[in-house]
Amino acid sequence: MAKHVIGIDLGGTETKIGIVQEDGKIIKKKMIPTKVLDGRITVVTRIGEAVRELLLESGMNSSDVIGIGVGSPGSIDHETGTVLFSPNLPDWSGFGLAEMLEKISGIKTFIENDANSFILGEWAFGEFKGSQHMLGLTLGTGVGGGVITHGMLMTGSMGYGGELGHTVVEPGGPLCGCGSHGCLESLASATAIVNMAREFSKRFPESLIFAKPEITAKAVFDSAREGDHAATIVVERATRALATAIGNYIHVFNPEHIIIGGGISKAGDLLIDGIQRKMPEYVMPSFNGTYSITLSKLVENAGIKGAASIVFYRIS
Amino acid sequence: MAKHVIGIDLGGTETKIGIVQEDGKIIKKKMIPTKVLDGRITVVTRIGEAVRELLLESGMNSSDVIGIGVGSPGSIDHETGTVLFSPNLPDWSGFGLAEMLEKISGIKTFIENDANSFILGEWAFGEFKGSQHMLGLTLGTGVGGGVITHGMLMTGSMGYGGELGHTVVEPGGPLCGCGSHGCLESLASATAIVNMAREFSKRFPESLIFAKPEITAKAVFDSAREGDHAATIVVERATRALATAIGNYIHVFNPEHIIIGGGISKAGDLLIDGIQRKMPEYVMPSFNGTYSITLSKLVENAGIKGAASIVFYRIS
């Protein structure tokens, strides 16, 4: 039987679980509410039950699976499988998630931060799979980063590395959740895009943004696509922040591929073109032709596949 | 006999050559003018002769040496030992420096960019030798960078990586030699510090800077130390650029040690204190206590020792 892995995309509101083949094909998957408020023991027990059900429904048992991979928000100590700190999982600090899930399921369990899991998913199953030098940005509520350099997931001395979203690209810019000003996250996350749009309500009260049922990042991109001026300014500022940051990463990592995922990546061409157009301002000519900037093509199942890839990466 | 290595610090104006022991002790060294205008063949032949003399004077021959390491300015392809591009070595583009030196000397030769060589020197012989996660900044005419992550010299897909000096820290800042604006190099190199001081000649004509025999980076730091206002503004701007950049690298690499070398590092406390004081503005509290920022203690012989360490790194 081919190698199978369980991938668990642990989110603040919902958790997606899937059985994944070595070639990335998802045999079966399910989604359960995370219900963080029930407490971590209950949450992990429920996940363990869902894993058992999924195996049962697929006519498999735990010995048919070589491991469980969990992509989790927050700072993760992947050596010990512990959640160090996660804003979306309050009270999980210091929790030995891997150990508990391993005990419940009887399956070896590995954990990574969800942005690291994203780039591992690209490395294992994405358009440029197998590339030894690639980095990923997940643009969602926050901005996550993951780096593969020389074929290795770069996590730094304590496992805190790869925080690409907290590099400053606009000194004195908006206050970031981390306490600094002008981090990439404060300019290119969904939260940031919504904030920048709201701040324009007095200057551009007629903007299409404010005619949408709700002010979301999607509403801003849609308005920009319809030619709205305020929305275009916001998109330009966000894509300039991204171009500045990506230019920096190119000089630092000399990557082959920069891959963008997360909810904001659905803005598609408007996002990529906005970034690409500005790159010559931020990249030395000697780097021309050394890198690509693309949107992730794993889309819908990126979370499960990324989580599964943690096992393939750690075991391979 | 203990392992010996030849370290060659190839500079635009002078070249330093030394025989280095495994513990970093320099047995014998000499300095020769590089005389770049004589052409690359003549230059390398002269270096080969100097190596032969040095061995002879030490009662050694080529078989007593396990390798030659060359720290060279510019972009280096360390796989093939070729100089890709170097502003200080015009007409060396595409030159197989390692191959030729190997042929002349009969000794296996390795080349690295001088900033990579700097951090390898710290890894092999510095205050924090053996650290698996450290990065170096060389503040001289330009700003060079070298990164060791997970015990490995990080050079990226084509060997161009680690260009920490060309990350943007002040968008719209001074024009950098690379064509971008507000790179670290455009704010914290000796050239940048002199430029920023000169630009103040109309606003602060009475500044101590302009009473010095020559406007150099040292003159600016000396004036700041004497309480000069214009010089202090320049030093504050340079150290703010450094703090911003180092904050970014800390989030990206989660290093244990950041080590600063190069001519500007002679400014000592004025430089380090200026950076340290600003770090809380640029680093997430969760990184507190995870890193140190210090000046290189290898000083005088950093170039030769760094070059020698290339061999120990590649062969170990």
Image (tube, coloured by chain):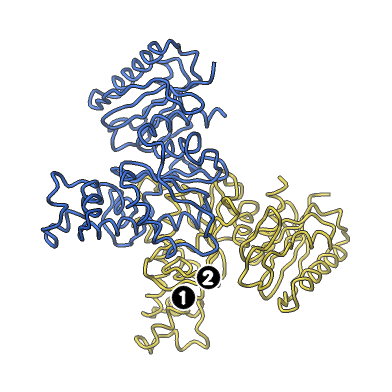
Chain colours: A yellow, B blue
| Helix, strand or loop status at disc 1 | helix
Label 1 and label 2: CA atoms lie apart by 10 Å
Q: Is residue B229 left or right of residue B275?
A: left
Q: Is residue A273 in view?
A: no
Q: Is residue B160 above or below residue B40?
A: below
Q: Nearer the viewer, residue B173 or A218?
A: B173
Q: How many C-alpha atoms fall within 10 Å of the one at disc 1: few (<14), some, or many (≥20)? A: many
Comparing labels 1 and 2, the label whose residue is closer to the camera: 1
Q: Nearer the viewer, residue B207 or A114?
A: B207
Q: Which residue is the site of mark 2? A: A264
Q: How many C-alpha atoms fall within 10 Å of the one at disc 2: few (<14), some, or many (≥20)? A: many
Q: Is residue B201 in view?
A: yes
| Helix, strand or loop status at disc 2 | helix
Q: Which residue is the site of mark 1? A: A193
Q: Are marks 1 and 2 in contact (CB under 8 Å)?
A: yes
Q: Earlier in the sequence, mark 1 or mark 2?
A: 1
Q: What is the chain identity of the residue bearing mark 1?
A: A
Q: Is residue A208 above or below residue B2?
A: below
Residue at (40% x, 83% y) in the render:
A199
Q: Amino acid at mark 2?
A: Ile
What is the quadrant of the C terminus of chain A in the image? top right
Q: Are marks 1 and 2 on the same chain?
A: yes
Q: Amino acid at mark 1?
A: Ile
Q: Is residue B228 left or right of residue A203?
A: left
Where residue B176 appears, as percent x and y from the top left, is: 28, 52
Residue at (36% x, 28% y) in the render:
B95
Where residue A270 appears, as percent x and y from the top left, is: 45, 69
Where residue B315 appears, as percent x and y from the top left, is: 55, 27
Residue at (43% x, 85% y) in the render:
A208
Q: Nearer the viewer, residue A261 or A200?
A: A200
Q: Is residue A142 above or below residue A156?
A: below
